[in-house]
Image (cartoon, rainbow, N blue to C red):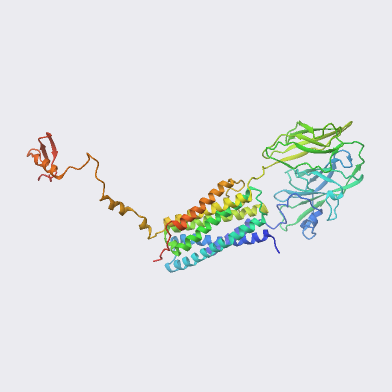
Amino acid sequence: MSRALVLASVVALLMVSSSSMANPGGNGDSDRDYTCGGSCHGDPSMSLPSDGTISISQDGDVFAGHAVAVHVNVAGMSLSSNRLLGTFILGSIDGNSDHPEDHGWHVIQDPNGGSSNYVETVVPSTGSVTLTWVLLAPQETGVHNLFAQTHHGSEPNYEGIAYTGVSRGYSIDVMPVPEGLPGLSSDWTAPAYRTSGNDDPLEIGTVNTTSVSVQWMLEGEWSPHDAEVSSQCQDMEVCNTWEAQLPSTMGDTRIQYQITVLNGSFSMDLPWLTMGTGPAPFEGDIWDARVQSFAFAFLVLSFIVSLQVRLSPWDGKDELDQTQEVIDSEGEAPPPPPGMEEEPETASEEYMARLVHSEENPGWLWDPVEEEWVADPNFQGGES
Amino acid sequence: MFGAETFHAAMAEIVVGTMVLATVCAVGCASIRYIPVSEDRRESLMITMDKASIAGASMALFFMPIAILSGNLAADSVVGNALLYNKFVYSGLALGFWAAFVVGRIRMGPGIWEVRNLSLLQSVTAVMAFLMTTMASSIGGKLVRGESLFDVLPIWFPSDSAVVLPIWASAALLVIGLAASLVVFKLGPRAERISLD
């Protein structure tokens, strides 16, 4: 019976762990090459083609070195129970040097607010998701290809198969920049997060810009608000360093903002960008932790050891027991204060001598001086 | 060669393994009087579990500082979040509980299990040490893999936020702790070995 119980417990513990799947929790957003440069999803013996569809689109014309929003729509794929989907945007599908940055692109912002070419998202119940990367186009004009790839699982997935899908190359015609066209600086990346409660202005790097306006709204809002924008330049017509005053955010709030850059007759509405709210930086340091840790260790140790001593049946406890000393010291009590002294024995005898027995009131004595009855101390049930 | 993270993981596994043995045996020692077994069998079980618990706890106590130091190295001596901070704090608490368990058993001998209150205290100390050590290890799992066994258990001590005491307060507590230890071990009454008669 007990062996069966132990066996059942072990089996139950094993069942608690999830079945073997490659990376069911994902690997997190990061910069990755095609199939992560050789993961289970790229191994023909461990993977199958995705049953989903991938489509890529862009917003408006693309000028060399200027921002463009590239949308990747993924739909109709099987998903594992956590509905996690990994999506890449790639400059090639060679298995190495596939990052868009390797092909002249620059990631301003990924769909999760960071600046990675691989992001993980939880697909909503509709089974379709659109992810938007904001990129700076290559400086080299002409046709450039972008690819999208997806990684996902399925449910059920008894053999732990990794599914992968890849789009055809999406051609983007990068046009030469009209002279004086304003845009974002190639070394500027949109911040993914801002610390909770931080209202420091957002720094924006631009090119060929004489004026900047910024609109913002919280995620879920529909009507944008104008932000106050100031430049870092003094008396210069073209300025490329700007500061936009966006309100501070707290909790899980995400703020979206759109930068519009102007130069004469040019006005470029750049794609909407998103900035999350990060937790305040942790204030503790290693020495705080070490000292607090050792302090607790010594406090716990001394407390429990003292409890052990207190509870132990130790013979030496008698040495600490002062009861006998107190009893002994009672025999040497200090004299009573004046007026509180006990009456001498003779006084008591005189008092008893003056008391008169009464046959009519057995057990009681008459005090003729005080003229009162007092109890007979020698009275014993009718015999005095 | 291998990195500090790997070494730390190995040390942590040794600590967790030995302390599970120690805790199970300590609880067994405290509760064996309530288990209906013959007197001879009970005595044999008691001796075995007592030796296993003290051996496991001593080993855990020996390897725990190594695990803590290797964890320091693995973290590059940087505490950047509440989880890591709490890992330090729980490690310190575990160290205190394990040390108290081993000190009690060594000072009072196997007779500690014969005194009902002491036996209860000793087993509670082992369980608390177990919980603190498991929390510290689970935080490691949270940091590295984003999940831990505690996710499916109804027990989870606070770890997402940390109470960071000012360094002067921690230092004051450390001084108090050291002074208390000095009083308990040097100035206070000595605990004597409990006779098994």
The residue closer to the viewer here, A321 or A77, is A321
Horizontally, residue A59 falls left or right of residue A161, namely right
Q: Position of residue A313 (x, y in %)?
A: 39, 59
Q: If the image is split into quadrants, where does the N terminus of chain B sit?
A: bottom right
Q: Position of residue B58 (x, y in %)?
A: 54, 63
Seen at 78% across and 45% down, the residue is: A115
Can residue B159 be seen in the rendering of this structure?
Answer: yes
Q: Quadrant of residue A70?
A: top right
The residue closer to the viewer here, B28 or A3, is B28
The residue closer to the viewer here, A55 or A220, is A220
Q: Position of residue A341 (x, y in %)?
A: 21, 42
Position above or below: A131 against A5: above
Position above or below: A268 against B137: above
Seen at 65% across and 52% down, the residue is: B142
Q: Quadrant of residue B74?
A: bottom right
Q: Residue furthest left?
A: A359
Q: How many marks?
A: 0
The residue closer to the viewer here, A299 or B56, is A299
Position above or below: B174 against A246: below
Q: If the image is split into quadrants, where does the C terminus of chain B sit?
A: bottom left
Q: Position of residue B46 (x, y in %)?
A: 47, 65
Can residue B18 be seen in the rendering of this structure?
Answer: no
Horizontally, residue A235 falls left or right of residue B119, namely right
